[in-house]
Image: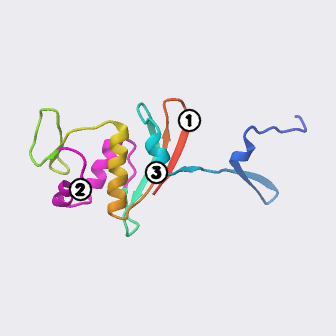
Amino acid sequence: MTDIIRIPNIENYMMTVINGELVLTLIRKYLKKEELFRIDLSKSKILFCTIKDYNDKIISTSNSYMSILIDIYKSLPHQYILQNTTFNIKLTNEYDDYVYYPEINMSIQHKNANETIKEIINMIVMNTYSLDIRFKLETGEIVNYQQ
């Protein structure tokens, strides 16, 4: 055993000593909405997501863009969604360029990850929900966003 311990990127951690033990806690840096919208989310993966409504009830912990959006839609009336969405939605079981979601009785024409996250955030803001999400980009970089 050596007397030296080297920890790369230590500036990314908060250090505390508890009962004589060094505890390192990763400091998360959160992007602003404008910064997130400038990032290419193509081929990204959602590592973590929690959405809560204004009563602190969990709406979604899904890890795919469309699953998160569907979870949000499940918490809202159809009329509200249709009036406020940027997606093409039909209240029928469509097959041509649409995907039918029986849990919300709607068919939705999909968009890419960048447009879907904009819709998710739009719905979060409009309904005073909270969002904590972490992405792993195609480059391997991990980014966080909170609303």
Q: Secondary structure at mark 3?
A: helix
Residue 66 lies in magenta, yes or no? yes
Residue at x 64%, y 51% (from the top left corner): 27
Q: How many marks?
A: 3
Q: Secondary structure at mark 2?
A: helix
The residue labelled by disc 3 is 33
Say which of marks 2 and 1 sits in front. 2
The residue labelled by disc 2 is 84
Query: Which quarter shows the N terminus?
Result: top right
Say which of marks 1 and 3 sits in front. 3
Above-or-below relation of 54 to 39: below
Picture coordinates of residue 122, whole percent (x, y): 34, 54
* Magenta stretch, residue numbers: 60-88
Residue at x 10%, y 42% (from the top left corner): 93
Residue density around tag 3, few if under 14, some if 14–19, many if 20 or more, within 10 Å: few
State the image quarter where residue 16 is shown.
bottom right
Amino acid found under the numbered disc labelled 2: Asn
Amino acid found under the numbered disc labelled 1: Glu
Give whichever of discs 2 and 1 has the lower sequence position.
Answer: 2
Picture coordinates of residue 109, whole percent (x, y): 20, 39
Q: Nearer the viewer, residue 112 or 28?
A: 112
Q: Are marks 2 and 1 in contact (CB under 8 Å)?
A: no
The residue labelled by disc 1 is 141
Query: Which quarter shows the C terminus?
Result: bottom left
Amino acid found under the numbered disc labelled 3: Lys
